[in-house]
Each structure stands twice: as C-alpha cells, then as structure tokens.
Image (cartoon, rainbow, N blue to C red):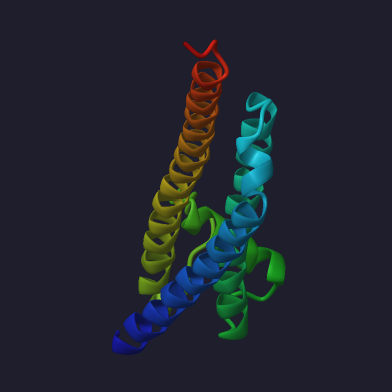
Amino acid sequence: MFIQIFLGTVLILLSVVVAAVGFGLYELGLRRAHKWLITEPHAPKLFVVLASAVITVLWMVTAGVWIWTLAFRGLGMFAHLEEALYFSLTAFTTLGFGDLLLPQEWRLLGGMAAVNGFLNFGMMTALLIEVLRHVRRNQIDALRQAREEAAKNALGSGPNP
C-alpha cells in the first residue's frame, strides 16, 4: 500500500512539474508577445491567446496521461501500450469505464491517477481564465492610457490665451 502511495505521489508531482514547465513556457511566450497583444485590434489577438492556451493545456494534460501510461506499462500492469494509455486516459479524465482494471495489488494507483487528472483539469481551467483575464486587462489598460495621452495632447495643442 505504501509503495503505491509513494509511487502515485511521485507520478502526481512529476505531472504537476511538467504542467508547471508548460505554463512557464507559455507565460514566457506571452511576455514576448506583450506589445503585440496590447495593440489593436484586440479581438483577433484574444482568439490567438485562447487558442494557444487551449493547445498548451491539451499538451500538459496529454503529458500527464503519458506519464501515467508509461508508469503502468513499465510496471507491467498491462500487456500492451494501448491498454495502458486507454486506462490512463479514462482514469485521468475520471471517466473510468471499468472495462480495464489494474491488478489488485496496484489498484490504489487508479484512484491516484484520477486525482491527478482532477487536479490538472482544475489547474488548467484556472490557467485559461487567468491568461484571458490578464491579457484583456492589459489591453484595456493600453486603451485607457492611449485615450488619456490623446486627451492630454488635445488639451495641450489648443489655442494659447
């Protein structure tokens, strides 16, 4: 039992580290694109941010599923890679059809894979919302600043008494 808990914890932490690296790389990309993102037109750029964030999230979730798949296969729980992948995916998404089961001595790992998936989907949802909120807030701040500068310039260029 303790070996399962230890191994499951290691796999969860590995999945979270991979997700953190993915998030860090995505954030680096957003920083590099900051000036482009805050210039108009904003709507198409929000679409690009949303699409790229979804692709990043899918990559992170896929990486997590593969971490579990390789662990299940490496420990000899499934005879074929496809079975290990199928089980990992159904456990990770908490769908759990029940048509494939882990050996009794490893069954706690199935629940831990589900917890990992639940945790990852929560983190990724938060990432999507935060990215969109952050980019949109920066766009609004840039518009406000541009309007303030335009108003200041308009006042400064008026007739002098």
Residue extending furthest left?
2
Residue at 49% over, 24% down: 152
In this rendering, does residue 87 appear at all? no
Closer to us: 16 or 102 = 16
Residue extending furthest bottom?
3
Closer to us: 129 or 80 = 129
Residue at 49% over, 17% down: 155
Query: Where's residue 68, x and y in %?
Result: 54, 71
Using the image, determine if residue 70 lies above or below residue 112: below
Residue extending furthest front?
161
Closer to us: 36 or 91 = 36
In what quadrant of the picture does the N terminus appear? bottom left
User: Left or right: 152 with respect to 32?
Assistant: left
Residue at 40% over, 77% down: 8
User: Left or right: 117 with respect to 45?
Assistant: left
Q: How many marks?
A: 0
Query: Where's residue 100, x and y in %?
Result: 54, 60
Query: Where's residue 124, x and y in %?
Result: 47, 51
Query: Where's residue 61, x and y in %?
Result: 56, 57
Residue at 46% over, 49% down: 127
User: Left or right: 121 with respect to 18?
Assistant: left
Using the image, determine if residue 48 lies above or below residue 56: above
Residue 3 in which image quadrant: bottom left
In this rendering, does residue 132 appear at all? yes
